[in-house]
Image (spheres, rainbow, N blue to C red):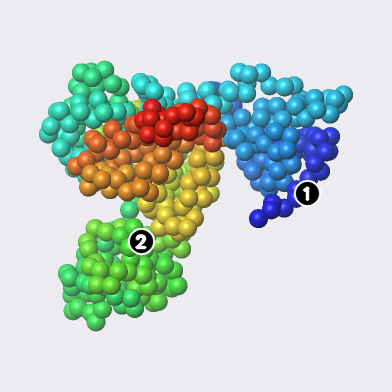
Amino acid sequence: MLLEAPTVPTSPIALLHSLLELRREITKEGEARFQQWHSKIKRPEFIPSARNLAYYLALRWRDLRAIQMALMPWGLSSLGRIESRVLPNLDAVINTLGALCHTHEALPPRPALDAFFAGDCQLRRQTEELFGPIRGKRHVRIMVTLPTEAGTDPQWSVALLRQGMNCARINCAHDDPATWEAMIGHLRVASQLTGQPCKILMDLGGPKPRIAEIAPAMVRLHRGDRLRLTRQICPEGSEIPQLTCSLPEILPQLEVGQRIWIDDGHIGGQIIHKDEQGVEFTVTHCKEGQRLKVAKGLNFPDSDLRLCPLTESDRQHLAFASCHADIIGYSFVQSAEDIALLQRELENYCGDRPMGIIAKIETPKAIRALPEMIIQAAGRQPFGVMIARGDLAVEIGYQRLAEMQEEILWLCEAAHVPVVWATQVLENLVKKGVPSRAEITDAAMAERAECVMLNKGPYVGLAVDILDDVLARMEAHQQKKTPQLRALHSWQPCETETVAIGRQ
């Protein structure tokens, strides 16, 4: 199918005028937004990143497809890789077009090489500040969720560090402070033995709604079944199965017609009735005969739930984490105010010591608030973003996950903020020892992030080994969206395919 002709004039002089006007507009709009942010930024080194983010937002509010297509015949289609360097990239294209036109118009100065790549260097610095230095050929970090075994077996951490782990994640929803302290102690010793630095992330559980009780205990589901989500199990029983929620305060916030998802989207329903005790819903999606289980997560994608992202348990865990961890993982954060809340809590424990924060993006509200969250967090301390694809897919719909994942990556690159690619990375390999074809491709695409997270499982060491190899190979071909044009050896002339492939 032929592409539609661009509406922007294709002559170089007309295109030059279009780009100059575009530059004037985004500079004006971007600078206005940056000035709104400026007072919130306490780290001077983040100011260029914040300004670039403001310009990027102004740029991307426009549909640039016609301009991009018009630039392509002139070999100037680089706007597609503009994230980390908005004005330098525009200025480079404008100056090249000016040279083609032999114009005497006043043009912005052509950016120096250092200025052109300053954003990429800033992203590297921000990544190293959050995750520490890295050794070897790759730049993408590998984060591994620690199992309970890491607290009892000192050799577990030694083996994982040698295989390529760069950051260890402790999920505060599991185990206890004594186990966490043992994990961290073994990891610190292992880091000294191997010479491999390793940052520690402690991931707060947050206000995750879950099924607390089920009555009757054994429930097999079928489409069309009715269920009650209630504050407490009715002792006299009920005609339909009853569930209680670990966060009963959300029940008044639900409304008829809204959707409910259970167990990461494996079970779906729609609310058909609401009363003082809770809601009743009809099962719309499930595997026939699927069993309902306690502790499975609940998602309400149509509901604007008002929950404090720091639970009482989280506050208790912060006291421990502030003494032992390098980074705090912040679950279900949805606004700049939520970031400010965690910052105030950390000040009570850490004082002026800047503790790193990773915000887990899990809801549509968090996506919409991401620019303001970045300014609030990265303007004060080392900061990163985790694309928590499990809850995010349920909240926005699986069909939109890939699109939003890309947009989050672009936005964070514009702010020079590192991203963690998380949830089900090499899941089959970690748990069963054999990867699926699709998850190898997913792992390869994770090279566009600054860190990739693996969950715990019996074959996680093998997964780290393979992921290390995949990321190193992909970095030789691509960094972010920029092809590196490494020589392709698979199709060398005068050599058999077997020999060529074996050399790579």
Q: Residue at x 22, y 61 (%)?
A: 294
Q: Quadrant of the C terminus?
A: top left
Q: Is residue 251 above or below residue 69?
A: below
Q: Residue at x 83, y 38 (%)?
A: 11
Say if residue 37 shows up in the picture: no
The residues tagged by marks 2 and 1 sit, at their Cα atoms, a distance apart of: 43 Å
Disc 1 marks a residue whose amino acid type is Thr
Q: Which residue is mark 2?
A: 265
Q: Residue at x 38, y 30 (%)?
A: 499
Q: How many marks?
A: 2
Say if residue 125 shows up in the picture: yes
Number of the front mark, 2 or 1: 1
The reply to whether dot 2 and dot 1 touch (C-beta < 8 Å) is no
Q: Nearer the viewer, residue 444 or 16?
A: 444
What is the x, y in percent for residue 143? 32, 34
Q: Which residue is mark 1?
A: 7
What is the x, y in percent for residue 462? 24, 36
What is the x, y in percent for residue 200? 30, 30
Which residue extends farthest bottom? 239
Q: Is residue 226 above or below residue 363?
A: below
